[in-house]
Image (tube, rainbow, N blue to C red):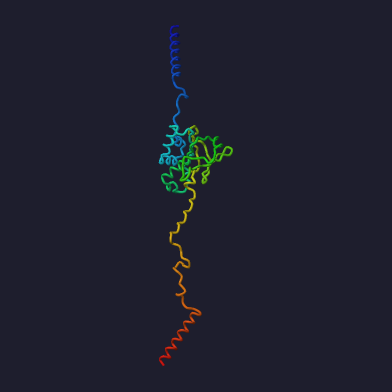
């Protein structure tokens, strides 16, 4: 009997220790979630190597993560992440032809300073401003939402917004199968105006490309003037003969 009582006491003590340890251990909700990190999301996606490289080279990954962690923008951010195949489908040399600042603008043209879910895309007000700025005005995109399909267009490129790699406020990252080429960087350039003519270079009336036109005095005698010239010559010869004879 005493042995059985001892076992009961030991078992009760063990149960008490387990209960205390469970009460002291933090539950899942007590563990704070880590700050959003666009690089970690893209790495997990597995097919965004080129976009990650561009973000790193232009320091846009560091800037975006810093703004997210410091709550720089209370509205959050949305990133359209082109796949590696999207970059492979560009014309060869497209990225290398851009200056450093243009590469920054290209990356920023894929970032919206607003957190969007697939549902909130339905009520987006176009044009939607991106993080990029052109020479004269901000670079924008248009969101076209019909039923359950959402497309994003730059005016040069239109592509469907595919699955969300992450959509937890303040950061949403969506996969796209095309690079969003902005009009400001890849649109047709307006022709340069023709240079103005220098002052004092007006063409004189009657002058041709080869110089001033010949005057009447320089022209060869023709018609009545030619006849008069022949007549005066004959009269001079007759007077000379009469004098000699």
The residue depicted at 46 percent of the width and 22 percent of the height is 27
**Pick the front one: 18 or 233:** 233
Query: At 47% across and 36% down in the image, what residue appears?
Result: 45
* Residue in front for this viewpoint, 94 or 155: 155
Farthest top residue?
1
Residue 204 point in image, percent of width and height: 46, 65
**Of 106 and 21, which appears nearest the observer?**
106
Quadrant of the drawing holding the C terminus = bottom left
Q: In the picture, residue 199 is in which quadrant? A: bottom left
| Quarter of the figure with the N terminus | top left
Q: Which residue lies furthest to the bottom in this view?
A: 245
Please determine whether, in this image, residue 197 is positioned above or below residue 86. Answer: below
Q: Which of 122 and 239 is in front in this view?
A: 239
Image location of residue 161, percent across then percent down: 52, 39
| Residue 70 percent location from the top left of the image | 43, 32
User: Which picture quadrant has residue 51?
Assistant: top left
Placement of 75 over or under 190, stated as above or below: above
Total residue callouts: 0
Q: Where is residue 40 in the image (x, y as percent from the top left)?
A: 44, 34
């Amino acid at each position: 009997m005493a042995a059985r009582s001892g076992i009961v006491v030991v078992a009760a003590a063990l149960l008490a220790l387990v209960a205390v340890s469970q009460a002291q251990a933090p539950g899942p909700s007590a563990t704070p979630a880590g700050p959003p990190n666009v690089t970690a999301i893209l790495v997990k996606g597995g097919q965004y190597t080129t976009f990650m490289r561009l973000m790193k080279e232009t320091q846009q990954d560091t800037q975006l993560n810093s703004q997210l962690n410091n709550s720089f923008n209370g509205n959050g951010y949305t990133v359209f992440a082109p796949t590696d195949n999207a970059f492979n489908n560009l014309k060869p040399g497209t990225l290398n032809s851009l200056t450093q600042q243009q590469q920054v603008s290209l990356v920023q043209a894929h970032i919206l300073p607003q957190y969007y879910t697939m549902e909130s895309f339905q009520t987006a007000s176009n044009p939607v401003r991106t993080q990029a700025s052109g020479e004269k005005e901000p670079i924008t995109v248009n969101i076209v939402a019909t039923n359950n399909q959402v497309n994003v267009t730059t005016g040069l490129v239109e592509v469907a917004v595919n699955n969300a790699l992450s959509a937890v406020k303040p950061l949403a990252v969506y996969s796209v199968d095309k690079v969003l080429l902005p009009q400001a960087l890849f649109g047709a350039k307006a022709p340069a105006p023709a240079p103005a003519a220098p002052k004092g270079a007006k063409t004189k009336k009657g002058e041709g490309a080869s110089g001033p036109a010949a005057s009447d005095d320089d022209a060869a005698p023709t018609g009545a003037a030619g006849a008069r010239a022949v007549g005066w010559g004959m009269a001079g010869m007759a007077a000379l003969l009469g004098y000699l004879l």
